[in-house]
Amino acid sequence: MRIDVVTIFPDYLSPLDLSLVGKARESGVLDLRVHDLRDWATDRHRTVDDTPYGGGAGMVMKPDVWGAALDDVVGSGDPARAPRLLVPTPSGRPFTQDLAHELAEEPWLVFACGRYEGIDARLVEDAATRMPVTEVSLGDYVLNGGEVAALVVVEAVARLLPGVVGNPESLVEESHGADGLLEYPVYTKPPTWRGLDVPEVLLSGHHGNVARWRRDQALRRTAERRPDLVARLDPSALDARDREV
Ligand SMILES: O=C(OCc1ccccc1)c1cn[nH]c1
């Protein structure tokens, strides 16, 4: 997979040189390129923003600078080879594990990281004539720019790529995994720590009981912390025992 990120703060993306994503880049599984939007600014001050039409506080990012940058990054415009453009914004489509899996299937992603009050709306309108565009929201809060959101999406997607995570098994039993439940609590040595014991069942070696305990914990946690997820559970996925939890 190729990923391009266009931003006025390229250094914000340097954490992607580390760890799993860093290894994926070395191994060639991930081809990540970061571009400084100011390289496409035309004036001496390398201006990328201007005052908003209609008034209001803050500044808006210029469509012409962004357009020139995306034209260069995306290139010819052959629809068969067009990337999916991702624009992090509070007003976007909620980013979920399902969307992460959807994006992990794409051969090429391009992130447009907005700052200030955002990017002139015509950039997305124009780009959508040549490539699929998804405005994506990480949640109902406001960041100063899209870079941190891009880091989150890149990490969530890269870890799903074959060969990135050592043990693909570890991708299955996680929160918001296939069963739509939150993850159960995990423990490791020592068996007692500061007077706190690991639940007996986990030391029993009885795999059936362990699996049952874990499912009960996941159900209980989900009911306590995320009633919204319980509402969306597929009833047929719950057995009679589950309903007692
Ligand atoms: O703040 C965010 O993106 C940066 C951004 C982009 C455009 C205008 C303001 C801020 C964000 C919040 N949830 N998901 C994304």
Image: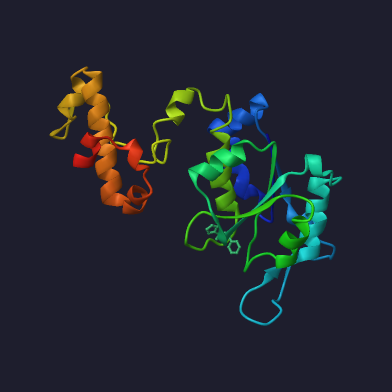
Q: Residue 115, relative to residue 104: is it above or below?
A: below
Q: Residue 115, relative to residue 81: is it above or below?
A: below
Nearest the camera: 105 or 200? 105
Residue 108 sits in quarter: top right
Residue 124 sits in quarter: bottom right
Indicate the quadrant containing the N terminus: top left, top right, bottom left or bottom right: top right
Residue 151 screen position, x and y as percent: 57, 46
Ligand 1 placement by image quarter: bottom right
The extreme top residue here reads: 205
Kindly tell me whether residue 214 is visible in this rendering: yes
Would residue 212 appear left or right of 165 to someone viewing this image? Answer: left
The extreme left residue here reads: 195
Residue 66 screen position, x and y as percent: 76, 59
The extreme right residue here reads: 76
Q: Could you tell me which residue is drawn at 65 percent across and 32 percent down? A: 30
Would residue 45 appear left or right of 10 to someone viewing this image? Answer: right
Q: Residue 186, relative to residue 43: is it above or below?
A: above
Residue 207 screen position, x and y as percent: 25, 19
Q: Could you tell me which residue is drawn at 61 percent across and 46 percent down? A: 13
Q: Could you tell me which residue is drawn at 22 percent across and 31 percent down? A: 213
Q: How many marks?
A: 0
Q: Could you tell me which residue is drawn at 34 percent across and 51 percent down? A: 231
The extreme bottom residue here reads: 55
Nearest the camera: 123 or 179? 179
Would residue 193 appear left or right of 130 to someone viewing this image? Answer: left
Residue 118 screen position, x and y as percent: 64, 65
Q: Residue 192, relative to residue 42: is it above or below?
A: above
Kindly tell me whether residue 182 is visible in this rendering: no
